[in-house]
Image (tube, grey):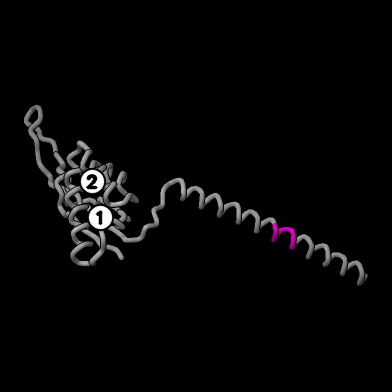
Amino acid sequence: MEVRATYRYAKISPFKAREITREIQGLPVSAALDVVAYSPKKAAALINKTLKSAVANAENNANLKVDGLVVKEAIVGEGPTMKRMMARARGSGSRILKRSSHIRIVLTDEIKIETRETRKAAQKAAKKKASESKAESGATEAKAEKSAKRAKKGKK
């Protein structure tokens, strides 16, 4: 079962917030809360708030236990940008972009946690299996060709 929480129009650049969300993806909720609590960045406080909201949704709305929850995805999308002007030299002005973001966290109760190492191991196994099956199919094709050649020789 998936549970989600969204913090919309957060007053922080998505680029800055994505740095923290990359760290917590795939972690159990308790570990993710620890990572966010001890991070000195402003984005960590906003993500902490969203993560706690997702945990509360899981407990109250979906009747899930917090111990088994895992952060399936933590996504930061772009929100609207406020355009402002700042005075510059010789009476000119320059534009300042004040960016905002939408933070979405999805929790799941599935225990399977995929890390980089497990993903790479699975890819290697798939490549190995594909190369083995390709070699076997190549051998059977070669045998079929040889038998076809023999049949042609016998007819002539």
Label 1 belongs to which residue? 105
N-terminal of the pair, mark 2 or mark 1, is 2
Q: Position of residue 150 (x, y in %)?
A: 88, 66
Determine contact: label 2, label 1, CB under 8 Å. no
Q: Give the quadrant of residue 156.
A: bottom right
Q: Position of residue 78 (x, y in %)?
A: 22, 50
Residue type at the position of mark 2 = Pro
Q: Secondary structure at mark 2?
A: helix
Label 2 belongs to which residue? 14
Residue at position x 17%, y 40% from top? Answer: 42
**Residue 138 falls within the magenta-colored stretch:** yes
Q: Nearer the viewer, residue 62 or 22?
A: 62
Residue at position x 31%, y 45% from top? Answer: 22
Circle on res. 18: none
Q: Which secondary structure is most common in the magenta stretch?
A: helix
Report the residue that reaches farthest toward the bottom. Answer: 155
Q: Secondary structure at mark 1?
A: strand
Q: Position of residue 64 (x, y in %)?
A: 26, 63
Residues drawn in magenta: 136-140
